[in-house]
Amino acid sequence: MFQQLVTQYRARLKALKLDTSRLRSPPPRLVFVTSNRDKVIEAKRILQACGVQFKHLSLRYPEIQDSSLRKIALTSAISVYRRLRQPLFTEDSGLFIEALGGFPGPYSSYVQETIGNIGILRLMEGVRNRSSRFESVVAYVESPRKNQVFTGSVEGRISIEERGSRWGFDPIFIPSGTDLTFAEMGPEAKQKLSHRAIALGKFASWLIEHGRKR
Ligand code: IMP
């Protein structure tokens, strides 16, 4: 709606032969705080497709240790909000492997940085039950007392070897219903299935429903 008004306004100025090159939409107020570039690329695709605009702020923030991704994401978002004082969201995700009792789960980022995919594949050597699940939690803080959490998950299995070359666990995670790892599929195919797309899709619907797209 707003974009439509800007376009109409530009067209009117053009008709009057005025310079419209400096006319810009105001920058979005909503901020995605993360130091993970791959998450930003995926979030852009997903949210922009729903007409939701955001600014990216690359910031590392401390994460509490807890077994609940929901608690980790919300605590981080609230602590970052106290610094920035503007509507923002963070996203926390993890890979839960059934045969390993849900490991690495909330420790996914540490495990990825230390033993990596090769280490996970070693832990899974000879293990027949390869079921696993990716989870994503988006935590949105709008004001000191207003926050919301949106979750998404995708079931799948751990591959026998790394296949494809995208980020994180993408080369070893095969979502249910396919034989390809996330890394072997194009970004559009991943977007149709991913834990992050589900959580961000719910977030976008909420923003649209509550008139807070920017
Ligand atoms: P965090 O959400 O930043 O705490 O990190 C979770 C870790 O899980 C990341 O470092 C990634 O390595 C991994 N991860 C989360 N989501 C994905 C994904 O969609 N593809 C690949 N790896 C992921």
Image (tube, rainbow, N blue to C red):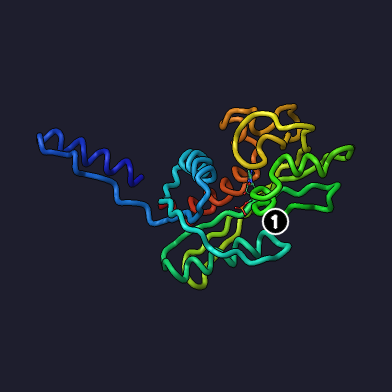
> Where 44 falls versus 80 (above or below)?
above
Where disc 1 sits, the SS reads helix
Residue ID at (53%, 60%)? 140
> Where 64 falls versus 194 (above or below)?
below
Specify few, some or many for label 1: CA neighbours under 10 Å numbering under 14, 14-19, or 20 or more.
Answer: some
What is the x, y in percent for residue 162?
A: 71, 32
The quarter holding residue 138 reads: bottom right
What is the x, y in percent for residue 96?
A: 76, 49
> Where 47 falls versus 149 (above or below)?
above
Q: Which residue is mark 1?
A: 107
Q: Quadrant of the N terminus?
A: top left
Q: Nearer the viewer, residue 8 or 58?
A: 58
Please state which amino acid type lies under the numbered disc 1.
Tyr
Label total for image: 1
Task: Tell me: 49 left or right of 148.
Answer: left
The quarter holding residue 13 reads: top left
Residue ID at (67%, 41%)? 169
What is the x, y in percent for residue 119?
A: 75, 43
What is the x, y in percent for residue 181?
A: 69, 31
Q: Nearer the viewer, residue 124 or 74?
A: 124
Task: Tell me: 86 left or right of 93.
Answer: left
In the orientation shown, which residue stands out farthest toward the left?
A: 17
Q: Nearer the viewer, residue 50 or 170?
A: 170
Is ligand 1 less than 8 Å from the beta carbon at label 1?
Answer: no
